[in-house]
Amino acid sequence: MESRRSTIDRMVVVGSVMLDLLIAPLARIPRWDENAFVENVRLRVGGLAANTALCLAHLKVPVDLCARIGNDSHGEMIFQCLQRAGVNCRYLRRDTRRSTSLAFGFVGEKGRRFFVVSLGANAELGKGDVQRIDWSDVGFLHLGGFFHLPRLEPALPTLLPALRRRGIRISLDLAWDPYGRWMRSLRALLPHVDFFFPNEKQTQRLTRTRGFRQGAQMLRKAGARTVVVKLGARGCYVDGDEWKGVVPAFPVRAIDTTGAGDVFDAAFLYGWRAGWDLQTCARFANIMAAASTRAYGATAALPTGTVALRWMKKFYGPPMERSTPPEHHNRRRRG
């Protein structure tokens, strides 16, 4: 197992940012020309990158967000929320040509939802935005919302190996691919990815298999070093050199699953940064992701790291001896 760097703390999250309009609860999807009534429409900061960065900041990890918002009131709302949460926004660019991305989320029973998304300024995030980043104190890059970033995609086959040569670890999460490209877009990137976080449906589409174990194995053969398949209410499946197995979900009454996968990514990477084994990282990520579903939006119901660790010990049993509480453990590995 590779050792973690001891001198670099900062993480950079690059990817999609949007304002979520969560329409809930939606009992049924109306037909064309019909109406449906809901109790509330809630505004929340969203997008895979923003949600992950917010959770990392909540867990007291130094984190920068590289993304684009519009030069408009929605963008200002997002900017203020991120800053209040402790996310460093020096690489968050206001685009004067495109508006802030909006995602209309329709939330139904048991927290299930679907989205109608305008890409907005996300579509303009490109190579130049990433070149502005000072990588000297960065140990980890997380790409959130790969399929929402059409201008950045062509630069990644060159960028990712260059960063890995510097000792920077890389993780990747996708969003849904509305164009059906799937593996054609990812094939050149996976050999440079340390942690890949698809959900079960994405894994099926990427590998054209129905079983998540087989799918994870195929994604590792394609180059990803560790694959973590998110299984929703069933937990997750980890396939890595150190350990393979299913980690059952932490049971909660889910209200809204929006952003739970992004919270999972942040919590898993947080545990890895702290020096935990893969199974303990997955347990902690399950706890944080499940907790996030108790309220509308990704981060409204997040517990502190200390509380999450207490729940983890109670539900799963004590972690491995070398794992220690997140507030007191900052050990890293050498790249």
Image (spheres, helix red, strand yellow):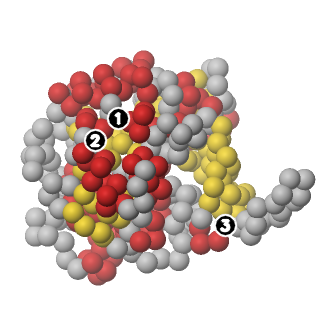
Question: Do the residues under discs 3 and 1 have CB atoms within 8 angstroms?
Answer: no
Counting from the top left corner in percent of width and height, residue 235 is at 38, 69
Mark 1 or mark 2, earlier in chain: 1
Tell me the kind of residue under disc 1: Arg
Q: Residue at x 54, y 24 (%)?
A: 124
Whether residue 244 is visible to the viewer of this picture, yes or no, is yes
Who's the residue at 86% across and 53% down the image?
32
Callout 1 crowding tier (Cα within 10 Å): few <14, some 14–19, many ≥20: some
In percent of width and height, residue 295 lies at 56, 66
In the picture, measured across the screen, residue 252 lies left or right of residue 24, that is left
Where disc 1 sits, the SS reads loop
Q: Amino acid at mark 3?
A: Gly
The residue where tag 1 is placed is 187
**Where's residue 116, x and y in %?**
67, 46
Mark 2 secondary-structure assignment: loop
Tell whether 24 sits left or right of 56.
Answer: right
Choose top left, top right, bottom left or bottom right for residue 272: bottom left
Q: Nearer the viewer, residue 79 or 185?
A: 185
The residue that label 2 is drawn on is 222
Task: State if disc 2 and disc 1 touch (CB < 8 Å).
Answer: yes
Residue in the picture at 66% in, 62% down: 107
The picture quadrant where one finds residue 283 is bottom left
Residue depicted at x 12% and y 38%: 335
- Label drawn at residue 15: none
Horizontal and vertical percent position of residue 318: 19, 77
Q: Which residue is mark 3?
A: 108
Q: Earlier in the sequence, mark 3 or mark 1?
A: 3
| Pick the front one: 115 or 303 | 115
